[in-house]
Amino acid sequence: MRKSLLRMTFRQLQVFRLVCDNRSYSRAAEEMSLTQPAVSLQIRQLEELLGQPLFDYIGKKLYLTDAAEALLLASADIFGRLESLDMQLADLQGSLQGQLSLAVESSAKYFVPHLFAAFRREYPEVNLQLVVVNHAQALKRLSANRDDLLIMSLVPPEMSLEFLPFLNNPIIAVAPPEHPLCSQGPLSLQDLTAWPLLIRESGSGTRQACEEYCHQKRAHFAHSLEVGSMEGQREGVIAGLGLALLPRHAVRRELDCGALRELPVAELPLLHSWCLVHPRGKYLSPVAQAFFAFVRNQRSQINALAERFVAPAQAASTQ
């Protein structure tokens, strides 16, 4: 090992990671209550120890070099091991403590807080750091080993991953209650194609799943409007801009209060499983191990939680 690497400090790595997260020296300085020159000095010292530049400026944008990408991955492992040590020391004192770093695809963000609340009832001294991402961002975070665990659907077979399917994610068609299709009988996906479809941004797992399924069923929508979030899709449907294919969990309250209606489409719901995922061979902290075991072993409790989201909506759609 290069002796220079042993002179790196945790403080330097903390500063470096914040610069990477913010893509900005000034924002990193603000978060750490430092001056921008102090941040620049820490990065310059790191670059001297590594013997390579960490960042490139192209235009006004900051980009990570290959050396920075390697250091970011190593620093995540270093701080992860320290967090694990803290958890193990707490475990030796008789309680599981620490933080679970969890990234979730946006389709799961309505359910996961309830899942973590159930877990925390068993381990009350565990905290949560939750990041909501789309499918493309989830894949990048997996490659960079940014999180303890990740919840996603459409697990890519080409990546070396361990995954645990634990709950269905039903995708349904929704419309405003005054829409003409709401007064018709059983529908097919083809019946929906005469109307505009509100879709998620490129990179969304829900959009990818729906596009592949509609293509398989030969249901081609001539008109679509791209909206950058499920909340935007939901409000767009309520406003009368078109129809949408959305996870039932995401529109449960709107279905219950009558702001939206679930359309009785024969080919729906489209079912995909949410999966708990981590890179194969990844060292899991005690907290991450406990959460993984909880999801694996508490299926009946998880299904009961899911019924709060599914059962009322299904009842509303049949009224």
Image (spheres, rainbow, N blue to C red):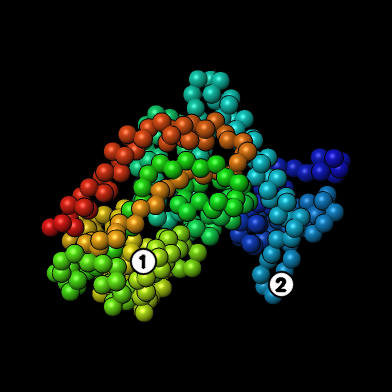
Q: Which type of secondary structure does the marked residue at label 1 adopt?
A: loop
Residue 18 shows up from this direction:
yes
Of labels 1 and 2, the one closer to you: 1
Q: Which type of secondary structure does the marked residue at label 2 adopt?
A: strand
Q: What label sits on residue 191 in the rendered view?
A: none
Residue 129 shows up from this direction:
no
State yes or no: discs 1 and 2 in contact (Cβ < 8 Å): no
**Residue 306 percent coordinates (x, y):** 30, 44
Q: What label sits on residue 217 in the rendered view?
A: 1
Mark 1 or 2, nearer chain start: 2
* In front of the other: 307 or 288: 307
**Residue 173 percent coordinates (x, y):** 28, 63
Q: In the visual, does 66 lie left or right of 124?
A: right
Q: Which residue is mark 2?
A: 58
Instruction: Tell me the kind of residue under disc 2.
Output: Ile
- Above or below — where is 44 with respect to 128? below
**Residue 264 percent coordinates (x, y):** 21, 62
Residue drawn at point x = 29 percent, y = 71 percent: 190
- Above or below — where is 78 with respect to 240? above
